[in-house]
Image: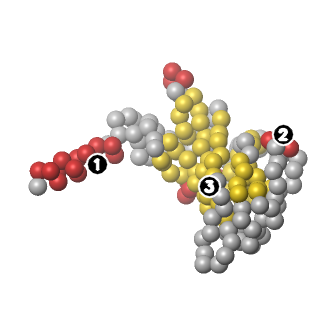
Amino acid sequence: MKNRQMLVWLFALPLVGCEGPGGRGALRPPAPTVDVAAFSLSSSPTALNWDDKPGPDGVIARVQFYRLGANDEVLSVPVKGELEFLLFDSRVPAVEVVKAQPSKTWRFPAEDLPNFLGKQMGMWAYQMQLDWRDKPPKASVVTLVARWKRPDGAWRYSDPTLVAVSLR
């Protein structure tokens, strides 16, 4: 019995936050902000199949926003504004993303973003399942970009990421 109690404490200790609201140990996110120094997009390296039919159905995308805290500490934060994901049916370099025409766009309005916010390894991030079954890509490698629309209307773009797609 004593060993079982010790195991429970060992697993429970990481859940107890030592910091105040919004710190790395906090279970509730800090208030959304526009004070963002950078943001990053990551995704599954290959497209995923979510149904029992052959062929890929989409990709999981994860976006993290960062701001500088006290003592130049990098903090992940939720944001105010909208988030969009752009899919291109080819390799599109970062310098061409703004002008290129995406084959598919997913929009997440500001009021929906909290539904996709989670914490993993001490960092807040938005994670979305981007389903393209209604319009699958035509290329074996696609480019995915996130763009954030600030409340003042200004757009910021992530660096592009490539996703391998096995065609149907």
- Give the left or right position of residue 146, taking residue 7 as reference: right
Residue 11 bears which disc, if any?
1
Residue 95 bears which disc, if any?
2
* 52, above or below 1, in the image: below
Mark 1 nearby-residue class (10 Å; few <14, some 14–19, many ≥20): few
- Give the left or right position of residue 95, taking residue 117 as reference: right
User: How far across and down, in percent of the image, does residue 3 sit?
Assistant: 15, 50
Quadrant of res 133: bottom right
Q: Which of the marked residues, 2 or 1, is nearer the chain's N terminus?
A: 1
Any part of residue 83 in sight:
yes
User: How far across and down, in percent of the image, does residue 20 sit?
Assistant: 39, 35
Mark 3 nearby-residue class (10 Å; few <14, some 14–19, many ≥20): some
Q: Residue at x 55, y 40 (%)?
A: 77
Q: Which residue is mark 3?
A: 44
Q: Which of the marked residues, 3 or 1, is nearer the chain's N terminus?
A: 1
Q: CA distance from mark 2 to mark 3?
A: 23 Å
Q: Secondary structure at mark 1?
A: helix
Quadrant of res 89: bottom right
Q: Amino acid at mark 1?
A: Phe
User: How far across and down, in percent of the image, does residue 36 sit?
Assistant: 64, 35
Q: Can you say which quadrant of the picture contains the N terminus?
A: bottom left
Q: Amino acid at mark 3?
A: Ser
Q: Residue at x 68, y 72 (%)?
A: 55
User: How far across and down, in percent of the image, does residue 38 sit?
Assistant: 65, 35
Q: Residue at x 81, y 50 (%)?
A: 91
Q: Can you say which quadrant of the picture contains the C terminus?
A: bottom right
